Each structure stands twice: as structure tokens, then as C-alpha cells.
Amino acid sequence: MCRSSASIATMQTTPPPKAMLLSIITKNYYLTVETNELLSKKIMRLTRYCERLKDESSTITVRIEGRDTKKRSDSVKVEVQIALPHKVLRAESRKNNVLDGLDSCLEKLEEQTKEYKERRKRGGIHKMRRVKVD
């Protein structure tokens, strides 16, 4: 966990065909390969809640920023943004390390993903018209 004064790094995992794109962007923060793989694995847990996350039309962007603050409890800012068809889900957290921040974001996104899935299901039901037969 080394910090540099003005470094910006972008790591993109190569998705399998017909899968979502995952981008991990860091600013003033260095991620090891092991931490990067662990972040990817944790983010993939969200696909349990919504099949649309596995679609190629969805993208997930993780931004990690190391910050110099007086409080050590919010020295790392983690922001996760999921772009789905017709909706963008977003969560942000400030913690003392990346994994705690990501866990906090994933808890928030889990609720948003479930709500998105339920609304999509209800939307299909409400669009159906009822016709009276005489």
C-alpha cells in the first residue's frame, strides 16, 4: 500500500465474451495484483442479485483514491458505479483501507441491485392491460 503524490493508474480486466466490463481506476494509491484480484472477485458477487449485471451492455467502474486527511479513518475513498440499461447505480465510501471501503459500497449496491430487479419485474406486470370480456 504505497502512495505516490500524483499517480493515476487504470487496470481493466479482460472480460470473457458476452460479459460486463470491469474497470478499476486508482489515484494516489497502489494496488497489488492480489488485491486487484480480490476486488474483482468481491464485485462479481453482485451478479447473484441481477442477471443484467452479467450482460455485455453493463459496465462497472471502481475508483479508488488515496487521500491525505487529518482523520486516518477516511484516508481511502472508494466509489463504485454500475451502468445498467436505463439505470446507473452508485455507491461511495470513505474508510481506512480499500477492502473495508469496497465492502461498504457492496452492501449499498446490493440493496440498489435488488430494488432495480424488483422494479424491472413489476414494470413488466404493470404494463399489461386488463380487458373485460362481455
Image (tube, rainbow, N blue to C red):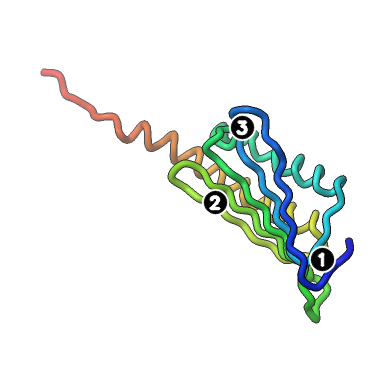
Query: Answer yes or no: do the residues labelled 2 and 1 have beta carbons within 8 Å?
Result: no
Judge the density around disc 1: few (<14), some (14-19), many (≥20) Cα neighbours within 10 Å.
some
Quadrant placement of the C terminus: top left
- Asked if the residue at tag 2 contacts the one at tag 3, i.e. Cβ–Cβ closer than 8 Å, the answer is no
- Expressed as whole percent of the image width and height from the top left, the position of residue 26 reads 74, 59
Would you say 97 lies left or right of 15 here? right
What's under tag 2, amino acid-wise?
Leu
Number of numbered tags placed on the structure image = 3
- Which of these two is toward me, 68 or 126? 68
Give the Cα distance between marks 1 and 3: 32 Å
Kind of residue at badge 3: Ala
Quadrant in which residue 50 is drawn: top right
Label 2's element?
A: strand
- Residue denoted by label 2: 89
Q: Residue at x 64, y 61 (%)?
A: 92
* Residue closest to the eye, 35 or 129: 35
Q: Which mark is residue 96?
A: 1
Which residue lies at the image location 83% right of the left edge and 74% below the top edge? 72
Q: Amino acid at mark 1?
A: Asn
Image quadrant for the N terminus?
A: bottom right
Which of the labelled discs sits on residue 19, or is there none? Answer: 3
> Along the horizontal axis of the image, is 74 left or right of 46?
right
